[in-house]
Image: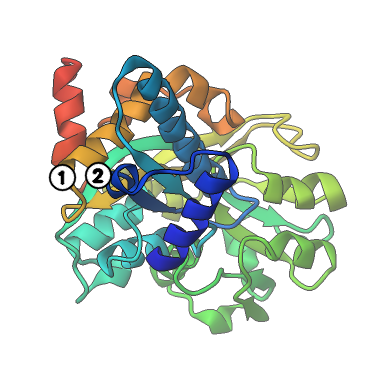
Amino acid sequence: MKRMIFFSMAAAVLAIGFAPTADAASKRTFISIGTGGPTGVYFATGNAICRLVHKEAAEGRKKGRKHGIRCSAPSTGGSNYNIGQIKAGELDFGVAQSDWQFHAYNGSSAWKGKQYKKLRAVFSVHPEPLHIIVGGKSGISGWDSLKGKRVNIGNAGSGQRGTMDFLMKRAGWSKSAFKLASELTSTEQSKALCDGKIDAFIYTVGVPNAGVSVATDGCGARIVNFNNSMASGLVKERDYYAWATIPKGTYKTTTSDVTTFGVMATFVSSSDVSSNTVYEVTRAVMENVADFRKLHPAFRNLDPKKMMKDGLSAPLHPGALKYYKEKGWK
């Protein structure tokens, strides 16, 4: 993967007229960020970070401060895939749900027996409410009424699938609880709902989300409350979960506030990635957070002092910590 990214990025550099000398090229660092499906907020997050890294590089050249980092953020399978590829050395950074950051670092849930102690937190991004999205004529009013329906549980390796596996286990359900348990990706599920092939899907994502709006605004799908006793127990027991609200008017069919719970989207790396690289990426984001807020509605409330702590369970990467200490935040 890294070899492909290197060549694609090198081609991009040449195409925009920055043909480097051999000496300059040797000083450049190419990083890859794992994201999610192309219609999701993770994809927007990774590409927004790359945009800020490149902006900082351009402005640094003018000011005599060069970091030489070039960045790509390809579409991937999501949280657990990203962490797995960081562990394998195929990605340098990734976006991941706060619960999967916790499980990977601690070797619990889907990461039991595969603990990744080199995982490092960099910062958190936006809150991600858990959506139960149902067809307009499905008769589903909440989690409990998913039983016996055709439900998309997410593709293997995604945070969505990991969350569904966890919730099903918590409820004492298996795949047989559903009439159909499909394994569609986040880019396929809304069309499948609109085409009548499934009755519902569960999706943990920042709001608003383009993929969700395909279903809500395109074919009248609804988002229903997830505030039953199971949800209450999870919020009480686990620090990486919190109550969340999907506000009225977020989507065409959201005619009242939806009560649910959720996680944080977090940005992670590995202790194998150099402190200098992580420092420069962290600096690029935090010094340009006002621009970051403009790049997607889910980013509008970003606060650097909260980003350096909220939803983070793995140790902070030394490169990120260096920046936070320089700012006097730690």
* Residue 303 to residue 11: above or below: above
Give the mark nearer the N terminus: 2 vs 1: 2
Residue 302 in sight: yes
- Image coordinates for residue 278, horizontal then vertical, percent: 25, 40
- The image quadrant where one finds the N terminus is bottom left
Residue 129 in sight: no
Residue 64 is drawn in which quadrant?
top left
* Residue 312 to residue 157: above or below: above
What amino acid is found at the position of numbered circle 2 in the picture?
Ala
Residue at image coords 28%, 65%:
89
Residue 121 is labelled as 2
- The image quadrant where one finds the C terminus is top left
Residue on which disc 1 sits: 315
Residue at image coords 48%, 76%:
173
Side of 45 relative to 145 (left or right): left
- Image coordinates for residue 162, horizontal then vertical, percent: 43, 66
**Secondary structure under the numbered disc 1 in the rendered image:** loop
Of the pair 212 and 26, the residue shown nearer to us: 26
Residue at image coords 14%, 22%:
325
The color scheme shown is: rainbow
**Number of marks in the rendered image:** 2
Q: Residues within 10 Å of mark 2 (few under 14, many from 20)?
A: many
What amino acid is found at the position of numbered circle 1 in the picture?
Pro
- Image coordinates for residue 54, horizontal then vertical, percent: 45, 34
Of the pair 64 and 182, the residue shown nearer to us: 64
Residues tagged 2 and 1 counted as in contact (Cβ below 8 A):
yes
**Secondary structure under the numbered disc 2 in the rendered image:** strand
Residue at image coords 46%, 40%:
50
* Residue 193 to residue 93: above or below: below
Of the pair 329 and 13, the residue shown nearer to us: 13
Q: Measure the alpha-carbon separation of dots 2 and 1.
A: 6 Å
- Image coordinates for residue 99, horizontal then vertical, percent: 34, 53
